[in-house]
Amino acid sequence: MKKILSLFLAALLCVGVGVQALAADAPRAQLYTIYQNGMLFQQKKDAVFAGTASSDDEVCCTLFNAQNEAVALGVGRVQDGVFAVSIPAPAGSYDEYTAVLTLDGKEFAALTGIVFGELWLASGQSNMQMGLSNSLTGKKMMEQGIVGSRWLRILEVPPYPEYAGDPDRIPVSPQQDIPGAQWFCADSTQVYATSAVGYFFGSKLRKTLDIPVGVVHVSLGGSSIYTWLSRESIERDEQVKADLIAQNRFITVQDWDETRRDPYVDMSANYNKKIEPLRHFRPAGMIWYQGETDIFRNCPYGAYSRAFSLMQKTDSALFGYKNGEQMPIVYTQIATYDYGKNRLQTFNTELSEIAQADSKTRAMTTIYDVPLTYTSDVGAIHPACKAPVGERMAYAACGLVYGENTPTCTAATVSQTQIRDGSVYVTLRNTGEGLAVKGNTLHGFSVCGADGIYVGAKAEIVSGDTVRIWSETVPQPVSAAYAFAQSNHAANLYATDAEGLTMPVSVFVTDKAVGKYYWQDRAFAACDYAQVWRMADGEKTGFYDIWQGKNATLSYTQDAFSGDAALRISAQGKHFSAATVFDFPVNRAVRDQFADADADYSAYGKITFAVRNDGEQDVTLDAVRFYTSRHIWFAPSVNGTGNPDAVIPADGQWHEMKLDMNSLYLFGNECALTFSRGCLTHLQNLSLQFKGEGTVCVDDFRFTPDSTQIAKARFVPSLQNADNLWETLCGLFVGLIARFV
């Protein structure tokens, strides 16, 4: 028994000694996860190292160069279990350093491969989060095994970091570290999973500045801007708090259930998990690609601007900007997608106002000219062409922060408007070397009169910073707009620098107070190009022909009435037509309308276009058909004749056709029931019908606004215009009905 007891005591003693030995070897301090080998610190600012410790002792950090020489030293002290010690960061270079940290003289961490350069935060939602491998350029890089430079360093923050061991749990107060965050060099295959926009931004910036660049990527697809704001800042900002309350989105501390909060919409959710833990970094600025979620939620005009300003103010203080200095932010307008009527263009207009409010710390890029190709993996809301987006952000950053290309670092916006001689003259700021058109003819412009009905307009550059906008159909304009449409891919006014075109001019409306009916960039009106981007359901979104022919071959000729081209319609039978493409096939039996096709033509009193007969025989314009369903169509009277048809002589000359939209004949029967333009609120198609043989060219469709209220239908039985027995019988029938109505 004594022997057994002795053995038990001896074993117990060994266990005790082992526990003491383990306790002695256990680290008494450790850095937060976001500090790792190969990381990058902002040059010429304090480099702050932070973490936790079990004793209130002195923490020292020593920076060694490649020759193992100590080049910087910092000393701090543990307080309440945490520490933060800073060293003066050297100038950026391609030298690598080692940082050694000690607690009470004992080493607990040594980070190798550290570099100093330009550090930027990359944040936002899905178009920022979209991986390099999903972008067009990135996909090719991955297929060919191409990676980036080892001098581009990236800190990848997980979309859903763990909190209390649970990635779905969201703290009511900010957490101190980000589990799962990882630094890597862009020459690693890990780069394919990081932000495409962030990668292209960092790569371009590194090449331009010739210095190491770091990108801290922290984003979440589908997240609202309010999720990136701190609760403390919201509580102090009465306007932003009121905006949240008005949207029923303000959440009190008492109502915050950490297990049921939503990282996509709930205030402070992403700030608490992913922004506050980065507080010890000192970024040179932030790139921001976000807003799609807030457009969908129909964020009230002005509310996003207030949230943006609060985010900039809060993050500036968090990342060490002192005395009210604002951290630079480069952000982009949003690409084409169907967010609802006028929502996209209104939001992009507000984004331009955000840049104008503080041009010293904010720069905005435009991307409506970037190819809208997408892959089935990411969908149409995520254009896969991300290289131009990131590179334009780098271009903007170079002007905003580093003194290069400053005059054009942000997209040109309106500075002054004058109305004279039937035209709107718009003067723009940030035009650089002067305005220029990409192509030959400006597109994307519209004007309106006092009635607020916009029509397509012509435009010309009259000086380096001014463009003239006008339409013969609006003799007294009061406002002009540019690229103000859901699909504005054809808009082509640019600022320039010494090397050529820089960024497209920002979306604008010169007087939003008179906007009753906006022009939706009817691509067919110009007859200058063959295809246009259209938004449809799912994978049917893409580029489509603007016109389609029946018994005719369609082409474009540079011998135009105006602009760059005219539509050429060559007959392949005695009856031929050309129709605008408003819808797309769902299956053989069903067609659906493009989401961005404006089907309402009820605002126009007249439509005028040019037509030319290049054949040897006269051709008849049989009717211009406006289809309100697959089988119901109306034809307007032409040139005030009271008839929907007109002869086009074979003289090779341009002739003007004027369509009276207040005199629409059902099925082209001009002796029976007559409708006004009020029936054209849901147009499905527009078709030009011809009789004869030869080649006809059409060009330059112009729209005349008309705010007059007219009855939708009128009984106008008259046998004088009857061309055949059918029309005579219809006239008699309608006349009989009219006697009893």
Image (spheres, rainbow, N blue to C red):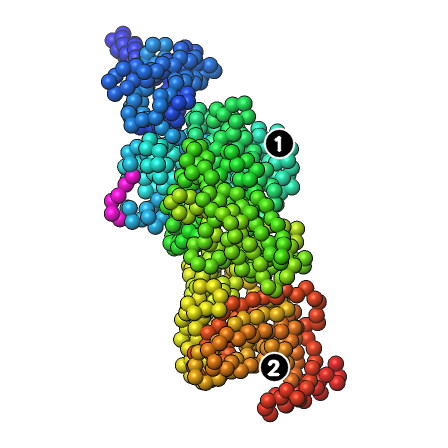
> Mark on residue 27?
none
Please give the residue where the numbered disc 2 appears in the rendered image. Answer: 643
The segment highlighted magenta reads 143-148
Q: In the rendered structure, which amino acid carries the disc numbered 2?
A: Asn
| Residue 572 in the image, given as x and y percentages of width and height | 40, 81
Residue drawn 42% across the image and 61% down it = 543
| Residue 359 in the image, given as x and y percentages of width and height | 52, 36
Q: Quadrant of residue 230?
A: top right
Q: Is residue 145 magenta?
A: yes
Residue drawn 53% across the image and 49% down it = 466
Q: Quadrant of residue 300?
A: top right
The residue positioned farthest toward the right in the image shown: 740
| 221 sits left or right of 422 in the view | left
- Front residue of 726/648: it is 648
Vertical side of 123 occupied by 648: above or below: below
- Front residue of 383/450: it is 450
Q: CA distance from mark 2 to mark 1?
A: 65 Å
Which SS class for mark 1?
Answer: loop
| 72 sits left or right of 350 in the view | left
Vertical side of 603 occupied by 135: above or below: above
Residue drawn 65% across the image and 83% down it = 672
Residue drawn 61% across the image and 50% down it = 418
Please give the residue where the numbered disc 1 appears in the rendered image. Answer: 237
| 157 sits left or right of 110 in the view | right
Is any atom of residue 456 visible in this view? yes
